[in-house]
Structure formats: structure tokens, C-alpha cells
Image (tube, rainbow, N blue to C red):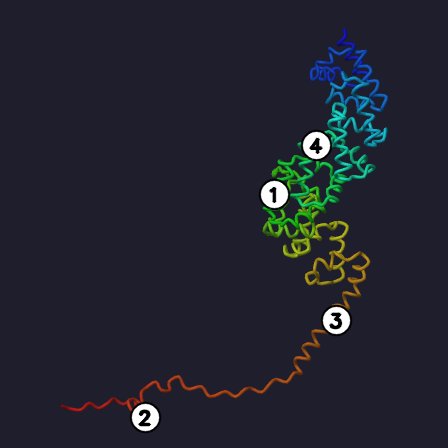
Amino acid sequence: EDAELLMEVLQKASGMTAKEVRAVLLKCPELLGSNLEVRVRPALAYLQEIGLGQDALRSVLRTSPQMLYLSVAKTIKPKVDFLRDQVGIPSKHLPAVIKRAPRLLFTSVENTLQPNLNFFTQELQVPADKLAETLSKSPSLLTRSLLTHLHPVAAFLSEEAGLSPAAITRLLLDQPQVMMSSLEEKLRTNLTILREHLRLNPSQISRILTSEPKLLGASVDTALSTSLLTKAMFLARQLSLTPEEVGKMACVMPSLLIMSTEGTLRPKIAFLLNDFHALPSDIASFPQALGYSLEGRILPRLEHLVASGADVGAISLPSILAPTNQVFAKRYSPEAIQRRVEKGEDQKRKREAKLSRVPRPPPVPREPRPSPLQNLAPPGKYGGEDWWQEEEVEDG
């Protein structure tokens, strides 16, 4: 009877089916021994009171059903108060935060939550208001071990990746998933790819990661197109480059290594090589070309130049793609292109006319070259006019 009543209470509060509730009880059989009136009902009531609806409760109970035998007064409420009053997470965001990281309600304030908060605000000097916004989206950061994860990752970012304190703070705010990534399995692996495969020096790595810290959190599964190594190898194959040359491209445009391979890089490279008739070296020397919209910039400008009669092959990629729309329209209007053609032809005629007026220097007199047969035969032996006659042989 108690089990049936418990199932009824859980179904009503969370909207779960009977099958889902049975799965929850199998995952946490301790609930069957909990006092329904002392633990379960008060916990559900409090979670509903702070804003968790059926969908949120269903998600939380499926992953962390053990929270229903926690004491509201001693365990659950102090964590919620800490998140709202100390971290600064608005009450309206608490349901989403608990749904994302129900483990927060099991984590010690004194041993973990407060030390981690101090680390972010005091050591990394993250502004409190911005930190609250970040932790609302990535609350699991607060549950990480300070000793075995947060401190080592921060040291790695500073000492090995070469990021400044300000860059580490920006990374935490903009890319908190990097701070949560495995140090050995992901962060160091991706740094090794930048250093040993792409042959980047520490200064180059620091500049690239300051611009795109997301690279450190890239997948290390080379079977995926999102892998940093896979993407670097793709660029090398498509543009016939060495890994070091791909690294040089990344130095110019760090975002190149976080672009989608199939959605961005492959179609743009194919268009530039096949339709634009650019050379791989043109793209390698101007990787920014891959950052422009294919439909919004590259294709319309090529169509404009072709329609205007411009010699596209004689114009560099930066000259075509880099100018603003206003500058491009002025520089490559049909009239401007015609003036360029006429100016080029006029300059060519002037060069030819100038060359025709330049007097040629008189030929330099040369000494007559000796005959190849001169001195071929010794004088007196075959010399003279009858040198071909046979020599007489004396008798006796």
C-alpha cells in the first residue's frame, strides 16, 4: 500500500507514467523505505514552491531521485539559499539551474560550493554579476573539485596554454565548458595538436587560444568532423598544404579551426577553387575568404564582376572580398572596370611607344674569328698551294 501511494504521489507531482515511476524506484529503492509524510511530500512541496513544474521534476527525479529523502530544512533549502543569496542566481532561474545540475542539492556548501565560489571571484577575479549569469547556464562548475580539477585546469591554461589572467576570466565567462573539460583527455590533447601537429610556437598558441579558447574544448574523437585534428587534416588535403601551413592559416584566422567542415569549409573551398578559379595558395594566403558568407558575399560579388566584364583571374581575393559593399560597388562598377581596362591598354601602348623611340646602340665591332682550320697542319709539311700532293719517296 505504501509503495502504491508513493507511486501515486510521484506520478501526480511529476507527470511520469507508472512505468517511469517504477524505473525511478528501481534506481533508488531507498525511497520505498522513506517516510512519505516526513521526507517525500515535504521535498516535493518545497521544489514546487521554488518553481519546479512537472517537466522539471520529471527530469530531476529520473536522474536524481535520491533527493526526495533529503531533509528540506537541513539539506535542500540551505543549498537553494546559497545559490540565490551568495551566488546571485535570480529566483526565476533556480528551477532551470536545479534541472541542469540536481547534484547541487547534494553538494556541501562548506566543502565545495563556497570554496569554488571564492576561487572564481577572488582568484580568477570574475565579476559577481557576470559569474551569476554564467553559473545560471553552467551550474555544474560549482560542483567540480577545486583540488583535483579547477586549480589544475587554471594552472594549465596559464602555464601551458599561455593565457593571461584576463583571458582565463573571459574563457570562464564565454566558454565555461572548456573549464569543465577533462584536463588529460581533452585539454592537453588539443594543445598537443596545436603544438606538435600544426607546429605552432607558444606565442602563436597563446594568441590563437586567446581569440578562440573553444579550440581547447574541441572533440578529440578523430572519427568526428568536429575533432581539431580531423579539421586540420581536412584543410591540408583540400588545399594541398602541410600541417605547418595550416597552422599559419590558423594564426591569421583562428576561427578557421572551429568552423563546420561540411556546412562551411567544404562548400566554400569547392566554390573558390572550381567557380572562382582561385588557387589553393590564394586561399592559404587569405584564409579570411573562408569566413565570408558564400551566398551573401562571395557568390554575389563574383556574379557582379563577371557581368561587368572584369578579368576575375587578374584580381586578388582580398581585393574582391575584403572591401565593404560600398567600397566594392564603387571600385568595381561597370564604368570603373571599363576605365581600368582602358587605362591598362593606354599604359601598354605608351610602354610600347616608349620602347620604339629608344635609339638602339650601334653594333660593337668584333675581331674576326680565326678559321677553325687555321694552324691545323704544321707549316712546310702540308702547307702551300699543293699541300694535297703526295710526298716523294727517295730510292735506295
Is disc 3 in contact with disc 2, using a CB cutoff of under 8 Å?
A: no
Q: Which residue sits at x=48%, y=88%?
A: 367
Residue occupied by mark 2: 384
- Amino acid type, label 4: Leu
Residue occupied by mark 1: 192
Depicted 42 relative to depicted 116: above or below: above
Does the image show residue 267?
Answer: no
> Which of the 4 image quadrants contains residue 141?
top right
Left or right placement of residue 58 versus residue 285 in this view: right
Depicted 145 relative to depicted 226: above or below: above
Residue occupied by mark 3: 343
3 vs 1, front mark: 1
Toward the top, the furthest residue is 1
Is disc 4 in contact with disc 1, using a CB cutoff of under 8 Å?
A: no
Residue occupied by mark 4: 146
Depicted 180 relative to depicted 3: above or below: below
Q: Which residue sits at x=84%, y=21%?
A: 48
Q: Position of residue 44 (x, y in %)?
A: 81, 18
- Amino acid type, label 2: Gly
